[in-house]
C-alpha cells in the first residue's frame, strides 16, 4: 500500500514536453512543474513529483466574454 497525490486532469497543463499546474501561493498563483504518472477512471492523474498534497490548484474554467 502507498499514498499517492492526485490532481484533476483539467488542472494539468502541458507546455511543450512539460506538465504544469497552477498552485495558490498566498495571494498569488504560481506555475509549478510536475511529473505525472497513472491516469485514473475518475478523471484524476497521479502526480509523482512537484506537489506534496494539500495544495490549492487552479482549474481553468470556461472562457468568459468581456
Image (cartoon, helix red, strand yellow):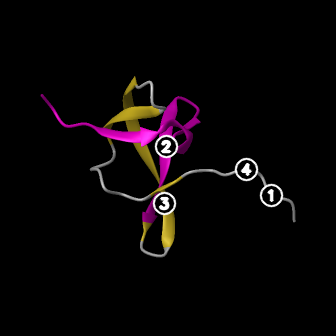
Identify which residue is drawn at 77% across, 52% down: 63
Q: Position of residue 50 (x, y in %)?
A: 34, 45
Q: Which mark is residue 20?
A: 2
Q: Is residue 12 above or below residue 26?
A: above
Earlier in the chain: of badge 3 and badge 2, it is 2
Q: Is 18 included in the stretch rendered in magenta?
A: yes
Left or right placement of residue 29 versus residue 36 in this view: right
16 inside magenta stretch: yes
Distance from Cα at disc 3 to Cα at disc 4: 20 Å
**Residue at left offset 41%, top offset 26%:** 40
Instruction: List x then y, in percent, for residue 29.
Output: 51, 64
- Give the foreground label among 4 and 2: 4
Q: Residues under labels 1 and 3: Cα distance?
A: 22 Å
The disc label shown at residue 64, or none: 1
Q: Which residues are magenta?
A: 1-24
Q: Residues within 10 Å of mark 3 (few under 14, many from 20)?
A: some
Which label's residue is closer to the chain start, 1 or 2? 2
Horizontal and vertical percent position of residue 7:
42, 42
Nearest the eye: 6 or 25: 6
Q: Are marks 4 and 1 in contact (CB under 8 Å)?
A: yes
Label 2 SS: strand
Q: Contact (CB < 8 A) between labels 3 and 2?
A: no
In which image quadrant can residue 46 be found? top left
The quarter of the rendered structure image containing the C terminus is bottom right
Regarding mark 3 in the picture, which secondary structure is present there? strand
Q: CA distance from mark 4 to mark 2?
A: 19 Å
- Cα separation, mark 4 vs mark 1, equals 6 Å
Q: Which sits earlier in the primary sequence, circle 1 or circle 3?
A: 3
Q: Which residue is mark 4?
A: 62
Residue hosting label 3: 30
The N terminus lies in quadrant:
top left
Amino acid at each position: 500500500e502507498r499514498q499517492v497525490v492526485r490532481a484533476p486532469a483539467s488542472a494539468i497543463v502541458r507546455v511543450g514536453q512539460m506538465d504544469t499546474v497552477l498552485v495558490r501561493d498566498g495571494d498569488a498563483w504560481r506555475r509549478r512543474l510536475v511529473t505525472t504518472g497513472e491516469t485514473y477512471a475518475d478523471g484524476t492523474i497521479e502526480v509523482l513529483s512537484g506537489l506534496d498534497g494539500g495544495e490549492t490548484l487552479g482549474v481553468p474554467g470556461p472562457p468568459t466574454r468581456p
